[in-house]
Each structure stands twice: as structure tokens, then as C-alpha cells.
Image: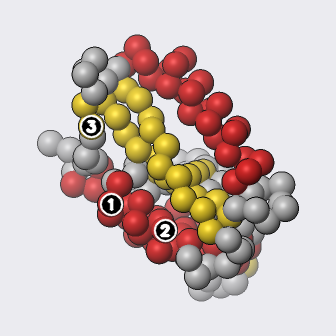
Amino acid sequence: MVPECFQFSTTSLKDDRTVYKVGVLMASRLDSPFDLERCGPAVDIALDTVNEKFLAHHNIELQKVQESYPTCSGALAPGLAADMHFKNDVIAFIGPACAFALEPVARLAAYWNTPIITGMGDQPSVLTHAVDFFGHGHGADYRDESTLKTTRQTQL
């Protein structure tokens, strides 16, 4: 039996493919190298490639659920992530790519046991609050809140 935290709702298509949803959560129109207008096409290409080359022969497809927020702040991003989690049952998040938005989303995702793919996970303030999510078993540097020193976690 699969533990409840690893059970996701899936959609079955006509050709018996199982669909899992991935949440894409990024700032929009920030004139930043990490906003949705610049990173969105790369995410689309990556999902198409993964679906075609790695998942098609398993009859699995990843579908994008996309939301954006207008400024780099933690005000809207956690609510959008919650909507994706509860309404769309996403299995992972791509983004946020902004440190202020990433911190609260990382806390929620850690609680939900949902992975995040982001280029901003190296920010010390984010890692302090998301040690288990970002550092567990991946050889990542993180700060231990109890001792306030940086350590290196090794793979298990």
C-alpha cells in the first residue's frame, strides 16, 4: 500500500495515459532573467522533452499548471501555491525564482512533501527554513538554525 503522502490524483486520457500536474509559479514582467516571460518557454520545452523522451513509453504525461505574481514578494506566491496544491493537486513546483516568494512557498511545500525545482534555492535565508526540503540527501549546504553554522550534508 502506498502511503497517503505519496498518493496523487491523476487524470487518465483516452489513450490510457496517466497525467500528473506540475505547478509553474514565477513572477511576471519583472524585467528579470528569471521571470515567466524568459523562463516559461524553457519550462515548456523541458516538459515536452521529458514527456516525449522519458515518460511516453510509460504512458505518463506531465501537464503544466501555471500562475504568476506581479512583484517579487511573499504576499501572493504562497496563496497561488496553495491553490495549485489543493485545486490542481500538483506533484511538484517549478519556481518561484525569486527569493522573497520562494521562502514561504518552500515552507508550504516542505509541509506538503512536494518538491520544488528552482534556481534560487541557494539563498541562506531560504535554506535556513527549508533544510529538509532542499538539503536532505543531496549534498547541499545549509544553515542549522540551532547552532547558526553552515554545514555540508552528505548523501545517505
Q: Is residue 67 above or below residue 126?
A: above
Residue 38 relative to residue 21: left or right: right
Q: Identify the residue at the far left of this view.
A: 1
Q: Residue at x 32, y 60 (%)?
A: 87
> At numbered mark 1, what does the secondary structure look like: helix, strand or loop?
helix
Q: Position of residue 90 (x, y in %)?
A: 40, 52
Q: Which residue is mark 2?
A: 80
> At label 1, which amino acid type do we have?
Lys
Q: Which residue is mark 1?
A: 87
Front in this rendered view, residue 145 or 101: 101
Of the numbered discs 1 and 2, the one sitting upstream in the chain is 2
Q: Which residue is mark 3?
A: 11
Q: Total label count?
A: 3
How far apart in space, not on screen, are marks 3 and 1 (Cα)? 14 Å
Question: Is residue 58 among the parts visible in the rendering?
Answer: yes
Q: Residue at x 54, y 17 (%)?
A: 53
Q: Position of residue 114 (x, y in %)?
A: 43, 57
Q: Identify the residue at the far top of this view.
A: 57
Q: Position of residue 77 (x, y in %)?
A: 56, 71
> At numbered mark 2, what does the secondary structure look like: helix, strand or loop?
helix
Of the numbered discs 3 and 1, the one sitting upstream in the chain is 3
Question: Is residue 135 among the parts visible in the rendering?
Answer: no
> At label 2, which amino acid type do we have?
Leu
Q: Residues within 10 Å of mark 3 (few under 14, many from 20)?
A: some
